[in-house]
Image (cartoon, rainbow, N blue to C red):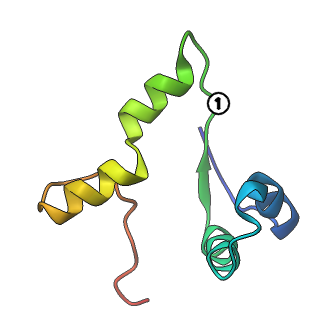
Amino acid sequence: MNLTSVERAFTEKHYEELAGKPPFFDGLVDYVMSGPVVTMVWEGKNVIAVGRKIIGTIRARRLRRRHGQVSHEPSRDPEK
């Protein structure tokens, strides 16, 4: 696990599948670049499926939020 900052070119490449969805894409890139990010390398059998189960899908997080359940949302600066 590593705490780092990412550059625009790297962030745009990482999220390139969303590039055709402005203004969502630009806001996402700006948000990711707004502070440090935690990077990790996960290895193992079915690691993508396991990671998604731990983190949850976007849809699952939205449903939990609607029903007042604690979710795996990142913390945010209340001043922003």
Who is closer to the viewer here, 31 or 67? 67
Residue 20 located left or right of residue 31: right
- Residue lying furthest bottom: 79
Q: Is residue 61 above or below residue 34?
A: above
Tag 1 residue: 41
Q: Residue at x 62, y 71 (%)?
A: 28
Where residue 47 appears, as percent x and y from the top left, is 54, 20
Q: Is residue 31 above or below residue 55?
A: below
Task: Give the quadrant of the C terminus.
Answer: bottom left
Q: Is residue 37 above or below residue 21?
A: above
Where residue 65 appears, as percent x and y from the top left, is 22, 62
Residue 74 located left or right of residue 21: left
Residue 71 located left or right of residue 59: left
Residue 73 placement: quadrant: bottom left
Who is closer to the viewer here, 31 or 59? 59
Who is closer to the viewer here, 61 or 40? 61
Where residue 76 appears, as percent x and y from the top left, is 39, 73
Residues packed near mark 1 inside 10 Å, few (<14), some (14 to 19) or many (20 plus): few
Q: Amino acid at mark 1?
A: Val
Residue 69 placement: quadrant: bottom left
- Residue lying furthest front: 20
Task: Give the quadrant of the N terminus.
Answer: top right
Q: Residue at x 24, y 56 (%)?
A: 63
- Residue lying furthest top: 45
Residue 11 placement: quadrant: bottom right
Q: Residue at x 40, y 41 (%)?
A: 55
Under tag 1, what secondary structure? loop
